[in-house]
Each structure stands twice: as structure tokens, then as C-alpha cells.
Amino acid sequence: MRRRSLISVLLPSASLLVGCSGSPRLEADTPAPGIGIGITLPGEGLLSAEVAYARDPIIARYDRFVGSSAKPARDSGEIQVFGDGDRWMIERYRVPADESRERILERRVLLSEGGDGSVLLHESVGGKEQLTTVFDPPVRLAAPLMRQGDSVEGTFTPRIRDASGQRDEPGEGTARVTYAGRQRIETPMGSFDADLIMTEFTFDFGMVKVTRSARQWIATIRPGRTTIVAEDIVERRSVFGFASTNRTRMAIRSLVR
């Protein structure tokens, strides 16, 4: 097994092993430093996969928060959505404070329609070496329509692939996506009544294990423009028995396009 490549994609930086103590558990109403979670709104029927994972071309800029800090980091974040036909991509970038420097691609995911109105996740690209994780079979992220409290779950085989197409030994993975309802939240761009989606992915490669939990708030920021307005991500890793936790958050600051 090409262990070095596998560790590189799951553990992008040795600096993640320090500076984050404990393992915060993400609940629907848990406070998130830098993101103002207001009241929980009454249930409003159904959330469609089309809204939850909107494919409309969009570029938005975000304040980034690292660890437990409620103070924005110097570097900002950017999310871009683009695609064609029944497939589209969501890309996340870290934008250096000195914008003359090249932005850094942190994660790219490839999505598609499931044929019945659902949304499927095919692959994810990221890490220091920009390795690709192929999901076999594709992960079902959302049913066509979901009520508050509804979840979709699945298992998959994660396969790590480098730029040359070579692969590491496959592992085992699980996914759970829940529509947690609606919340009013505060961001640098303003207040939004947002739909909250909670996800949890696990990756098990034997001596390397990763759990990635996330909250994403989805809202209409302008008529016809729906996107992620905030997110809170916690990654827990165990590499040869050595555990670490990394937490990052983003809150929308402006719409670029």
C-alpha cells in the first residue's frame, strides 16, 4: 500500500496535530464561535435536494475561523459552484490576506443528479498533494425531498488516487446526512433564515481512521441565488494510534458573482 500518499490526503499538515484539544461534538443548536445561531424556526415542510445542493454558478467570499477562535483568521475563504448538465462541482479555497498570492484549493467535490431528484457525491479532491478520493458507489447525499429529522445513510469504498491515476489500497467508509430543520443565523453579510444540513463521514484504512462532521447552513442570499451561508467542520483523525482534532468555520461575507 502506498501509505505515504494515503496519510498525505487524510492528514494534510502536521500542524493539525497540535493546538486543538478535545473533540467537540456538533449538535444542531451547539454554538459555533464566529457564527451567530439564533432561534430555531418552525418546521416548514420539505427541503429539496435541488435547494440543498444548488448548482447555480456562484462565487462567494467568507470569513474563516480556526479552532475555537471567534476572531476571523487573516486568510479568508471562497466557495465556487460551477458545472454543466447533470454534474457540477463545489470548490473551496483559502484566499491569502495578500491577494497577490495564489489562492489555495482546499477541497473540490463532484456531484450529480441521482435520476430521481436525489444528489450523489462521486469524488473529492484535496490535501497537500491534491489527491482524489473516489466514492464507490457514489454517496447519496440527499433524497429528492426531506422533512426535518430525515436522514440518508450509506456505505462506500473510498479509493485514493493520485494525479497519475495510481491508487492506494481501498478502505471502508460510511456516510450519514440529516436535514436538521431551519435556524436564523447571523453572518458578516447579514441575518438569514437557513436550512441546516448535518453530515458525518467516516473513513477506515486500518491504521488510519478519519471522521468528518459538518454543519452547513443553506439560504437564499438574493432572489434566485441560494448557497452555503455558513459551515462548521470538525475532523478527527487517528494515525497509527495518534489522535488529533481540527475545527474550521466559515461565514459568508459577500457575493462575488
Image (spheres, rainbow, N blue to C red):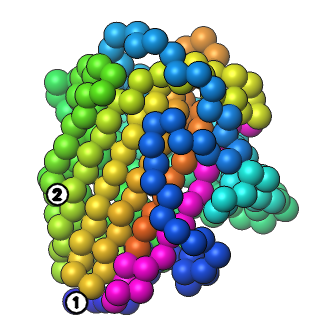
Residue 246 x/y as whole percent: 54, 67
Q: What element carries label 2?
A: strand
Pick the front one: 44 or 96 = 44
Residue at mark 2 to residue at mark 1: CA–CA distance: 19 Å
- Asked if residue 193 shows in the view, the reply is yes
26 over 190 or under it: above or below: below
Q: For residue 1, which numbered disc appears in the image? A: 1
Numbered range of the magenta stretch: 238-256
Is 245 magenta? The answer is: yes
Choose top left, top right, bottom left or bottom right for residue 39.
top right
104 over 42 or under it: above or below: below
Choose top left, top right, bottom left or bottom right for residue 79.
top right
Quadrant of the snapshot with the C terminus: top right
Q: Is residue 61 left or right of residue 174?
A: right
Is 127 magenta? The answer is: no
Residue 48 x/y as whole percent: 33, 20
